[in-house]
Image: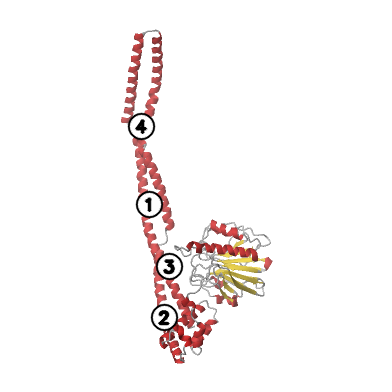
Amino acid sequence: MKFAHIADVHLGKRIFPGTPKEKMASQAVYDGFSAFVDNMIIEQPDFIFITGDLFDHVPEKQDLFFVDNLLSQLTETVILYVTGTSDYLKPGAAILDYNFTSNFYLLNCEEIHNRVRPDLAGERSKYAEGIVDCIHFAKHNLDVYGFCQYNARNGRNDVEGIYKHDPSHINILLGYGGDDECEPFEPEDLTSKAFDYVGFGRKHCFYQLKKANFCYAGSLEPVDEKEFGDHGYVKGFCDGLISSAKLVATAAVRYEASEEDAGIDIDMVERLNRENDLGKTLARMRTSDDLNALAAMQYYSKNMLDKLSEISGVPRDAIEKESLSADIVNRADREMKNDFKQELLALADGLTVYNEERARLDEELEKYPDVSGEINTVEELIRDKKYGTGTLEFADAQVDKIFDRKRTGFVMGMTMPLVIIFSLFTVFGALFAFFLMKWDEWWKIVCYIAYMTVVVGLLAFSLYSAMKKHKKLGNGKKDAVTERAHNQAWLATMYKDLEKYDLELHELKARQAKHRVAAEKSRELEEKYGKIVKRFKIISLIFD
């Protein structure tokens, strides 16, 4: 059974934000994933394992479509995916309802939405329980165990309770984590579990512990300048008797350690210290499987060279060429131990301060939670209310004009029939008198027409004025006063609602501002804590 293993792709991550190289570096993440799929089309492995942080955020439908469209080219390969702390599963996540067209499995003990061909498909095993899923592939006599992350942080050690159920099958475990922030376990813990392969995500650099068949795949492309060395995907093979895995370097970008980190001749420092504790420490760390071993060797060697230079007066870059007495080396070794002990004590104090500050910030974050969703809701209510208020204000401003038109129409409707009848009679009378040459009669009729026109006009004006004065329309209907009173009552209610929403929005923004301050302090504290913990682990490893 052939497989490929990737993790920590971080699609959508902004790399070097705000710098000229942001666009190119961020695009390299997508290019790296596309290149990986191209390689898989050529290699045609039986399985691809994706262990967390495929996306740099909880994926939306368009993110899933992009990945699904690429992976659907792999018609003979099954893809198994567990989430990490960046793309964690949350209630209502788009991936839970997405219908994959590729041979894709999400390991989370939920309904599987895909269209895998029957000859490639697996079935959920009876060993799936809790958050640990298990899918059995009869074709390969394979059980794949896996668990997803459901939050951005997880202090639980889920790995501790996982074990393989059927040793006669090929057993593979997929997961994410391995530090204090997520799944605090050590790779050595998996040695006794004897899985045929254990693939994890979280660490962005490749790491392999052969005695546990364990691999951190590392990221396809480095997403930080401190992610040194080769990056790519793990290529592996399992047949139930033997298993193998190796890194295939495919990354377009490669970062080297700085001169200060990379320029230390650890072998030379070890040769100088063969007879003392430092030499034994370096020899022990050289064969250690600990992730921090190389960093500890570099840190110890750098400090030792500085100490030797300080005691002997020989420039650091010339120490190898000079003969240093054993007394100088041993003195440097003793002083180094004391220095490191003092640093450990200082770091321990720093961890105590961190725990106190962490507790205080947790209380503050609990007191001022993230209310961005509530702010969006209130802002939408305000927009709707302002739109309604504006519409009503405009309608209220038009009330007098509307009722003037209605009065005019009513008066014209009442007088128009009289005017038409009167006009017909008078016009026919005038025509009759004109054609009979009765000029006196014709003149009288013309004058009568003029007189009646004035009378009708005065009548219409009087009726209009009376209606306006008594605030009435025809048929006893109310006039503008009632309508405006109704509008003003509604407007007063809407103004009160707006005032209430504005006040609520102000309070929410004040709380959100306090949340942002606390969250930023928390982020800074976590970053500081991470550095303290890393230094503590390095120095503790030296004194192990």
Residue 476 visible (yes or no):
no
Q: Which amino acid does the dot numbered 1 rest on?
A: Tyr
Q: How far apart are marks 2 and 3 (CA)?
A: 24 Å
How crowded is the residue under tag 4: few (<14 C-alpha within 10 Å), some, or many (20+)?
Answer: some
How crowded is the residue under tag 3: few (<14 C-alpha within 10 Å), some, or many (20+)?
Answer: few
Of the two numbered discs 1 and 4 in the rendering, the one whose residue sits closer to the viewer: 4
Q: Distance between the residues labelled 1 and 2?
A: 54 Å
Mark closest to the chain's N terminus, 4 or 3: 4
* Residue highlighted by disc 1: 501
The image position of residue 538, as x and y in percent, is 47, 79
Mark closest to the chain's N terminus, 3 or 1: 1
Q: What element carries label 3?
A: helix
Which numbered circle lies on residue 523? 3
Q: Do the residues labelled 3 and 1 touch (CB within 8 Å)?
A: no
Q: Which amino acid does the dot numbered 4 rest on?
A: Asp
How crowded is the residue under tag 2: few (<14 C-alpha within 10 Å), some, or many (20+)?
Answer: some
